[in-house]
Image (spheres, grey):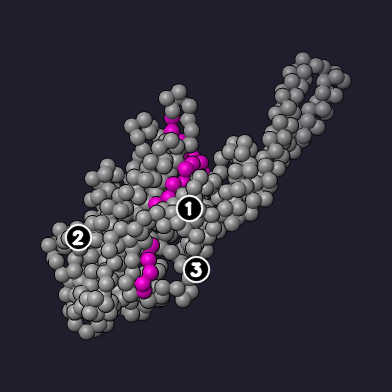
Amino acid sequence: MIDLRILRDTPDAVRASQSLRGDDPSLVDAVLDLDARRRAALTDFERLRAEQKDLGRQVATASGEAKAALLAHARTLAEQVKAAQSDADDAAVELDEVAGRIGNVVLEGVPAGGENDYVVLREHGVRRDFEAEGFVPRDHLDLGERLAAIDTERGAKVSGARFYYLTGIGARLELALLTAAMDKALAAGLTPMITPTLVKPEIMRGTGFLGAHADEVYRLEADDLYLVGTSEVALAGYHADEILDLAGGPRRYAGWSACYRREAGSYGKDTRGIIRVHQFHKVEMFSFAPVEQAEAEHARMLAMQEEMLALVDLPYRVIDTAAGDLGSSAARKFDCEAWLPSQQRHLELTSTSNCTTYQARRLGVRERTDSGQTRTVATINGTLGTTRWIVAILENHQQADGSVRVPEGLRPYLGGLEVLEPVGTPGR
């Protein structure tokens, strides 16, 4: 949730942020009006409560007709106190609802616009010239079927569209990739975590996933629980309603979990293979940091992501995501996109977001400062490896005979295996 002090002190900046996102700037004025109403109601309540307490002292010493009159006034005053309390409570509920619809204030330098208005910050690696090598690149599903690594036909038979099996070397490849990601996280001082994949509504809401994109989330109505689309949710909730000691630096975690996404609104998009699916696995980095360290922590995560991409030898680019393509919690987001030879386009493999204090304020995560006061912390998250990486690894490291060269960085995790060989007829 947005900091009300920022909204009161710099409403124009919040309006500008809303406009950059393509969201409604008039929500700012609605929140300011509700905030004023709530504070006025609280002032009335406190004034009436003080009068009520004073009247109670007068009743204690009065007698006869004077006492009867004071008691009558006390009954009227009690109703006024109750009404003022109710008005303040109603305003607070409405304030929370409207304020929760305002996205995090984007940081200076974030590009304006929507999904296609990103800024390319840099590119790394060399795209292979398959024409010069004398063959047309196969797509990841063709390769995966030849390797007996991916089975979408039986995935659909068992679970429906956008489900799949990773079999044999496919399963080993995912485990190798995610284990390498967890090793990198551990070497960088992150605490490994296996996180819950079902969370309470207040945790899902606190991380900002029940806003405009709530239709992407699976809900178990009978249990009033949500399936997470990323372990970011469970990691963000880990310290909910706690006061942290960050004197020694950020609290850093790496969560490994299954992830679930409904992919609502993506009909007909990336339906072939395992690019856009309902279930996958991921290693996610997450930090709770003092606000002054948030941008440095964001840069640190991006550097770790690029190190992982170098480990699996993929050509990629880094983009600065435009404001209109940010989630409500993110103040800035960088994506790493690998080159996809079969489609001649880039494919997002990682994102890292600086959520400043937006999530932590909703979840009640604070730190104690040197002065003994408490304040809201910043949260930062970033992908370090996920099932989708297999798509880019297979396509970029394929060979003319349908085999796939194993990136050197993954070989230790596959028993030294250097080449993945086709095993027979695709789909057998």
- Which amino acid lies under the numbered mark 3 shown in the image of this protein? Ala
In the image, what residue occupies the spot 13% across and 65% down?
Answer: 417
In the image, what residue occupies the spot 39% across and 49% down?
Answer: 381
Name the residue tied to disc 2. 410
State the CA–CA distance, disc 3 to disc 1.
18 Å
Residue 263 vs 385, above or below: the answer is: below
- Which amino acid lies under the numbered mark 1 shown in the image of this protein? Met
Mark with earlier residue (3, 2): 3
Q: Nearer the viewer, mark 3 or mark 1?
A: 3
Crowd band around label 3 with a 10 angstrom C-alpha radius: few (<14), some (14–19), many (20+): few
In the image, what residue occupies the spot 30% across and 73% down?
Answer: 140
Q: Is residue 92 left or right of residue 149?
A: right
Crowd band around label 2 with a 10 angstrom C-alpha radius: few (<14), some (14–19), many (20+): many
- State the quadrant of the N terminus: top right
**Label disc, if present, on residue 204 of the rendered structure:** 1
In the image, what residue occupies the spot 32% across and 53% down?
Answer: 305
Residue furthest front as drawn? 132
Residue interval drawn in magenta: 343-368
Residue 36 vs 335, above or below: the answer is: above
Name the residue tied to disc 3. 264
Image marks 1 and 2: residues in contact by CB distance under 8 Å: no
